[in-house]
Image (tube, rainbow, N blue to C red):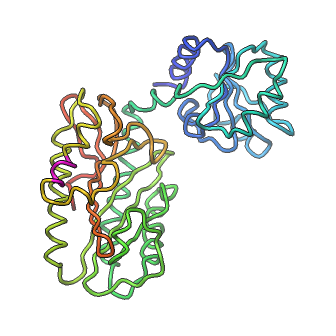
Amino acid sequence: MSARQRINKIYSQMKKQAIDSLLISLPANIAYLTTYPSRDSWLLLAKGKNIYITDSRYAAEAKNSLSRIFSIRQAGAALTETLASLAKELGIKKLGIEQKHISAYAYQKMACGLTGIAEVIPVIDIVEPLREIKSPQEIEKIKKATRIASAALRFIKRHIAAGAKEIEIAGEIERFIRHKGAEGPSFDIIVASGPNSSYPHHKTSHRKIAKNDLVLIDMGVEYCGYKSDLTRVFFLGKINPLVRKVYDIVAEAQKVAIKSIKPGIMTNEVDMAARQYIAGKGYGGLFSHSLGHGVGLEIHESPRLSPRENRRIRKGMVFTIEPAIYIPGEFGIRIEDMVVVTQKGVKVLSGSLNK
């Protein structure tokens, strides 16, 4: 889908919500609509005029890179002044603002700055539903991001050794992914060794890996703006029988969930498939987070696979499947792969499961 086609779909949504203009502030939404990375910018859609608002640091680059369907407006001292000027110029009367992506302070400031010129109207999820279904071009970028992450996890296996610090392992991963063409990690790399693995989002520390530890690594990369997210567990030396048992339960729960996915099934049904399997093995209270989340221009986006979200899964969606069991103070096992929904089921983007 081209930038023009995406913009036209947004204009259709604006018409349904009875607004004549929309200020987009979320960087991922701006990047999606312009097919250009957003840095300290805003996108104003108003009466067929698509205005990319940025400051002097980025204006020249944006002018050279954006499609001709966008014009560049350099922001003045304050965004509210620029908006007021544009509202008068274009005859804007009802300006939609992305409510979820702007602070209460900024919203109030805009409303005050446009008093007597235009009404500021909060809107929710105009762009995000379009982003749920990935185009073939988007899927290719996500696949590349996933391939780099998979290669990094294979690479790091030989660097995991007793005496190495978690933070050193994270550093080796980041060096590798940048060498392979990634813009960087898609989030702070998690390296959780021994008992630290029992914390779902452990902050990578200076702890030294010990003999017979397990090491959980959760990482992803950004490639051309698109993200990946994978988790693997590595073992040093002798594997504790309980650790092996829990690992096998989590691995099987992931397979059960993946087999359940097809267009039309509800997100909470997929979550329940894995959750019930884990509960049936006696560990139901130790799977503490959602089964998965959408991945694309953001590392966490719609849809969310959780007991509380009842969304219909559709072809072209990309999301993670990451069942887990965390035994407090001892260890945790999480296995995470990314899948894309196909006509009949899903394809695992990260290759063979649990490798």
In percent of the image, x 83 and y 24: which residue is there? 84
User: Would residue 42 be counted in the magenta stretch?
Assistant: no
* Quarter of the image where one finds residue 220: bottom left
* Quarter of the image where one finds residue 118: top right
Magenta stretch: helix, strand or loop mostly? helix
Q: Nearer the viewer, residue 113 or 27?
A: 113
* Quarter of the image where one finds residue 301: top left
Q: Is residue 285 above or below residue 312?
A: below
Residue 54 rendering spot, x and y as whole percentages: 74, 38
Residue 16 rendering spot, x and y as whole percentages: 54, 11
Q: Across the whole image, how many numbered discs are drawn on residues?
A: 0
Residue 123 rendering spot, x and y as whole percentages: 59, 25
Compared across the picture, whether 235 is left or right of 225 comes to left
Q: Nearer the viewer, residue 239 or 315?
A: 239
Tell me the magenta residue range: 274-279
Compared across the picture, whether 153 is left or right of 131 comes to left
Q: Nearer the viewer, residue 146 or 265?
A: 265
Residue 13 rendering spot, x and y as whole percentages: 53, 16
In percent of the image, x 28 and y 47: which residue is there? 349
In percent of the image, x 84 and y 24: which residue is there? 85
Compared across the picture, whether 7 is left or right of 313 comes to right
The quarter of the picture where the N terminus appears is top left
Q: Is residue 88 above or below residue 99?
A: above
Q: Nearer the viewer, residue 46 or 70?
A: 46
The quarter of the picture where the C terminus appears is bottom left
